Image (tube, rainbow, N blue to C red):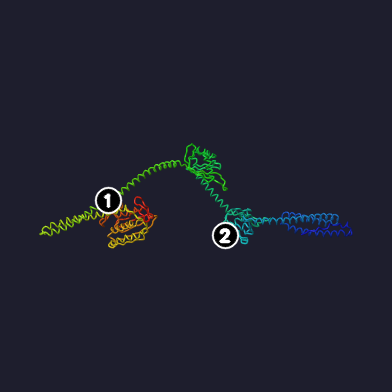
């Protein structure tokens, strides 16, 4: 509402415009009209005051001034009516009232101007505050009504909680609480506490739109109007998940450090202490005191060099060790160190550089152990090892001489066996020849006697001599000679296995085994045996010698079969970790326990009544396998059969003792 200043009142008497008698009445009428205008102005002022009442304390004070002014005006009007007869006094009062009215109008104009400026400032500050709140992204800032419904939403709230404004406005803020907290009534309790105390602050888990939780710092402030009535709540939330994780990590590290400190402090077997960046000792463990002899108060603040020998100090070893640790991160050393009492001990340990997060060197950690006993033991062991090495060299030379001597003797034995076998064969042939001649002579003598007259009278006495005594003796001599011949042949075969030149080739072992089975085909049929030859891996070996091994083992199974069950023979093989493993298994008589230790010796027979033989087959097989660099053994339980195993290297291993030459059809 605007106000227009009334013209300056004019004294009608002095103006001479009205008759003297009518002037007072006209003046009174005019004054009443003027009073009416004043009352309307006052009414307008009241309305203006009412409009300005809620704008601020300053406006209310201005309205109070206006009411006082209106009151003064009413009092002035009353004075004018009561003093209507005294025109000059009324005129003077009117001028005073006009002056006061002018002042009131001026005050109202100033109040209006102040109100407009206040409104503009308030609007500008609200705009700035709104921009400030909406631009904050690290904090969720929003308003709640008095029932907890969201009424404003900023960018930070959207960023931290995941809701857009249109998704969350009007919803109760309990949606941000974990279900168990919401069910427990915590949202209502927080509002009640903030309303009662004016402010509520806490740290707790809150829930985003996607259901994930975050650790939040929450401040809830009650908002009241000028009359103190609760209008709502201002809520500020900050995501502290990263800080909480960092705090938990820091707490965990602190706990670990405390545990480490306690552990380090209680370890008595290790020297553990720390240095500052300049190499001065700033911590001292129980183990350091126990081993070095210094109390903590004696060691703290002293140089690292105090534990070094004078010779090392002169060479700058402490400084060089710290420089190496600073350069590479740690420096490992083993050397003599000095105790407080001057005694030396052998120290083995490391100096580790310690740096802060910026990579700045802050100090060192020294961990060492007294290894004096171990050092002395190592020196003793080194001396013993040197002595042992000398003894081993000497013993090795002795063994080489012994091996050479044994090889020489073995060659002599083989040569002797060969020579003896040949030398014995000649008289054996003579014995066999004389036996045949004696048999022929006995036949002729019998014919001569029978041609004599009266031979029947002497024949009863001669026949026992010719047929029983001389015939039995000749048969015994013949059988012994045949056995002796077989023994000589076996010795020759065994001797040849020691002297034979092997020809190594890639052998199809399945063919060798099936050929060996074929040589015993008639005996297998007569025994009613069942022979199964599985797939056999190939190997590099002498084909003839390896065939002899299979032949001897299969023949052994046939000779020593059990009369109580049908004979079954299984031949198999497989490759195992660098060797080729073969076996020949049967269900025959088996091997008695006493015979297992001498199974592969010559002339060993454990079931002589079961079959004839010289006990040389297994010895020959053993010699062949051994010369190939392999191994042969047996598994058996008497009465349940036996299994003979032998293994050959996948790559031939040729030894000077048993083999000569090379592979691929070269002599071995």
Name the residue nearer the viewer: 306 or 184.
Answer: 306
Q: Quadrant of residue 569?
A: bottom left
Q: Position of residue 397 (x, y in %)?
A: 36, 44
Describe residue 614's horizontal placement relative to residue 384 as left or right: left
Q: Which residue is mark 1?
A: 419
Q: Which is more toward the observer, 81 or 431? A: 431
Q: Which residue is mark 2?
A: 210
Asked whether residue 268 is in view, the answer is no
370 above or below 658? above
Q: Nearer the viewer, residue 73 or 248?
A: 248
Nearer-N-terminus badge (1/2): 2
Asked if residue 594 lies left or right of residue 264, the reply is left
Badge 2 local density, few (<14 within 10 Å), some, or many (20+)?
few
Residue 636, numbered label:
none
Question: Which circle, 1 or 2, is nearer the viewer?
Answer: 1
Is the Cβ of the residue at disc 1 closer than 8 Å to that at disc 2?
Answer: no
Q: Quadrant location of the N terminus? A: bottom right
> In the image shown, does 279 or 118 lie closer to the viewer?
279
What secondary structure is marked by label 2?
A: loop
The alpha-carbon separation of the residues under discs 1 and 2 comes to 101 Å
In the displayed structure image, the side of residue 28 where residue 503 appears, left or right: left
Q: Residues within 10 Å of mark 1 (few under 14, many from 20)?
A: few
What element does badge 1 sit on? helix
Residue 188 x, y percent position in the rendering: 60, 57
In the picture as drawn, the residue positioned furthest to the front comes out as 666
Is any atom of residue 462 visible in this view? Answer: yes
Q: Residue 270, image x and y in percent?
A: 48, 43
């Amino acid at each position: 509402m605007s106000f227009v200043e009334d013209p300056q009142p004019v004294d009608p008497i002095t103006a001479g415009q009205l008759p003297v008698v009518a002037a007072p009445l006209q003046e009174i009428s005019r004054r009443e009209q003027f009073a009416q205008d004043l009352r309307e102005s006052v009414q307008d002022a009241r309305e203006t005051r009412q409009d300005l009442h809620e704008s601020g304390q300053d406006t209310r004070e201005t309205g109070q001034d206006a009411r006082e002014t209106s009151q003064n005006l009413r009092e002035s009007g009353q004075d004018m009516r009561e003093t209507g007869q005294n025109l000059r006094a009324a005129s003077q009062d009117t001028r005073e009232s006009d002056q006061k009215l002018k002042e009131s109008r001026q005050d109202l104009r100033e109040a209006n101007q102040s109100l407009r400026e206040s409104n503009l400032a308030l609007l500008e500050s609200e705009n700035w505050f709104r921009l400030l709140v909406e631009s904050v992204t690290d904090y969720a800032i929003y308003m709640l009504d008095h029932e907890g419904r969201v009424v404003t939403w900023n960018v930070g709230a959207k960023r931290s909680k995941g809701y857009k404004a249109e998704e969350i406005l009007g919803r109760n803020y309990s949606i941000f609480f974990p279900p168990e907290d919401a069910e427990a009534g915590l949202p209502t309790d927080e509002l009640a506490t903030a309303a009662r105390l004016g402010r509520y602050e806490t740290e707790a888990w809150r829930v985003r739109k996607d259901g994930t939780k975050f650790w939040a710092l929450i401040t809830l402030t009650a908002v009241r109007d000028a009359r103190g009535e609760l209008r709502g709540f201002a809520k500020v939330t900050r995501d502290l998940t990263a800080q909480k994780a960092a705090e938990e990590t820091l707490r965990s590290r602190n706990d670990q450090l405390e545990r480490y400190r306690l552990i380090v402090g209680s370890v008595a077997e290790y020297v553990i202490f720390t240095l500052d960046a300049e190499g001065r000792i700033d911590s001292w463990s129980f183990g350091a005191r126990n081993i070095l002899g210094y109390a903590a108060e004696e060691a703290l603040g002293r140089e690292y060099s105090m534990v070094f020998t004078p010779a090392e100090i002169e060479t700058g070893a402490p400084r060089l060790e710290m420089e190496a640790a600073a350069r590479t991160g740690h420096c490992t050393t083993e050397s003599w160190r000095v105790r407080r009492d001057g005694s030396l001990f052998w120290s083995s340990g490391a100096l580790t550089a310690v740096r802060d997060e910026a990579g700045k060197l802050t100090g060192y950690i020294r961990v060492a152990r007294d290894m004096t006993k171990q050092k002395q033991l190592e020196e003793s062991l080194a001396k013993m090892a040197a002595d042992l090495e000398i003894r081993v060299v000497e013993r090795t030379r002795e063994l080489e001489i012994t091996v050479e001597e044994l090889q020489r003797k073995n060659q002599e034995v083989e040569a002797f066996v060969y020579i003896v076998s040949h030398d014995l064969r000649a008289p054996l042939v003579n014995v066999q020849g004389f036996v045949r001649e004696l048999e022929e002579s006995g036949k002729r003598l019998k014919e001569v006697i029978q041609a004599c007259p009266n031979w029947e009278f002497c024949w009863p006495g001669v026949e026992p001599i010719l047929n029983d005594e001389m015939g039995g003796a000749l048969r015994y001599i013949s059988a012994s000679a045949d056995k002796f011949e077989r023994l000589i042949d076996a010795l020759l075969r065994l001797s040849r296995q020691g002297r034979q030149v092997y020809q190594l080739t890639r052998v199809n072992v399945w063919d060798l085994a099936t050929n060996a089975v074929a040589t015993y085909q008639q005996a297998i049929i007569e025994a009613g045996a069942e022979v199964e030859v599985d797939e056999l891996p190939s190997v590099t070996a002498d084909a003839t010698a390896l065939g002899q091994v299979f032949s001897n083992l299969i023949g052994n199974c046939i000779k020593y079969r059990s009369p109580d069950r049908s004979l079954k023979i299984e031949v198999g093989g497989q490759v195992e970790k660098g060797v080729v493993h073969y076996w020949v298994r049967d269900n025959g008589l088996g091997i008695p326990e006493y015979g297992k230790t001498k199974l592969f010796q010559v002339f060993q027979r454990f079931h002589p009544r079961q079959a004839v033989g010289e006990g040389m087959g297994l010895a020959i097989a053993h010699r062949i396998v051994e010369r190939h660099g392999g191994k042969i053994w047996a598994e058996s339980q008497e009465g349940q059969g036996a299994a003979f195993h032998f293994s050959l290297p996948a790559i031939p291993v040729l030894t000077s003792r048993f083999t000569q030459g090379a592979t691929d059809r070269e002599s071995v």
